[in-house]
């Protein structure tokens, strides 16, 4: 049973914490040393800037360490860098994993994230419940089982929240489809744009295949049409 394996806490891995601290130290030194040795800046400005920079980096490190997701028999505690939210099990509408295109494009970033949806259908990221820190399939199964067992026998999904969740997912899928098709179309559009350099074309066709028309209008148009078509096919009724 899912709730029997609670409490469960998810935090930044020690190895990634040390790496993050190293990046902050190196970045701070890269800013502090040139600023401290600059002779053409007022001393008051340098001291204020350096103090502000050190405080900002210190806060970033501290806030990142405080971020966590904790699952206990009463609720999901979600502590972000600024906001702390407590989601009672009965208020949660769903818990889902999601592919992150932005994360997949970055080295060392999580490409699979897990979100909970509150009573209004708002999406809440669960910090460190991702494919970098945990086995997402295993932990998601555990959280779903705990939610189903602890939300109460009289729990029922909120229809309005369900519609909002599905609409948000449809919008996100539409944007991802738009970007994907636009990237695929980039190569043939580039070929079309360069075609007048190698082939004699009518003047009107050359003007259509100008860089401004092909890339400035054609590429955004492909993105918009793909996104709109995807959203219309996926959006929920109601």
Image (tube, grey):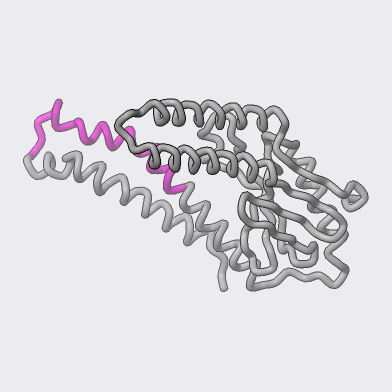
Near-viewer residue (103 or 168)? 103
Number of marks in the image?
0
In-image side of 19 versus 188 (left or right): right
Q: From the image, which quarter does the C terminus lie in?
A: bottom right
Q: Give the range drawn in magenta.
A: 177-202
Near-viewer residue (101 or 134)? 134
| Farthest-out residue, front | 43
- Residue at 52% x, 40% y is 102
In-image side of 171 versus 41 (left or right): right
Q: In this view, does 40 lie above or below 124?
A: above
Q: In which quarter of the image is residue 202?
A: top left
Near-viewer residue (221 or 195)? 221
How far across and down, in percent of the image, does residue 195 sit?
Answer: 19, 31
Main SS of the magenta part reads helix
- Residue at 63% x, 73% y is 160
How far across and down, in percent of the image, does residue 23 sit?
Answer: 56, 29
- Residue at 59% x, 27% y is 22
- Residue at 20% x, 39% y is 211
| The magenta stretch spans residue 193 | yes
Q: Is residue 124 above or below residue 119?
A: above
| The magenta stretch spans residue 165 | no
How far across and down, in percent of the image, does residue 12 sit?
Answer: 70, 37
Q: Is residue 76 above or below residue 56?
A: below
Q: Is residue 124 above or below residue 58?
A: below
How far across and down, in percent of the image, does residue 113 sit?
Answer: 64, 44
């Amino acid at each position: 049973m899912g709730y029997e394996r609670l409490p469960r806490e998810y935090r930044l891995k020690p190895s990634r914490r040390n790496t993050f601290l190293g990046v902050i130290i190196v970045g701070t030194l890269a800013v502090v040393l040139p600023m401290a040795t600059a002779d053409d800046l007022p001393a008051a400005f340098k001291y204020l800037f350096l103090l502000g920079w050190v405080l900002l980096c210190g806060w970033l490190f501290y806030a990142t360490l405080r971020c966590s997701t904790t699952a206990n028999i009463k609720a999901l505690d979600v502590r972000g860098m600024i906001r702390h939210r407590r989601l009672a099990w009965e208020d949660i509408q769903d818990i889902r994993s999601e592919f992150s295109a932005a994360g997949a494009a970055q080295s060392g970033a999580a490409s699979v994230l897990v979100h909970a949806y509150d009573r209004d259908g708002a999406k809440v990221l669960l910090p460190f419940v991702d494919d970098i820190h945990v086995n997402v399939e295993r932990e998601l199964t555990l959280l779903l089982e705990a939610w189903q067992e602890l939300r109460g026998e009289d729990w029922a999904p909120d229809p309005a929240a369900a519609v909002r969740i599905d609409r948000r997912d449809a919008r996100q899928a539409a944007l991802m489809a738009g970007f994907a098709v636009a990237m695929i179309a980039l190569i043939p559009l580039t070929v079309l744009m360069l075609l007048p350099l190698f082939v004699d074309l009518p003047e009107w066709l050359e003007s259509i295949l100008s860089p401004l028309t092909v890339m400035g209008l054609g590429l955004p148009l492909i993105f918009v049409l793909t996104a709109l078509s995807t959203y219309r096919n996926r959006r929920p009724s109601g």
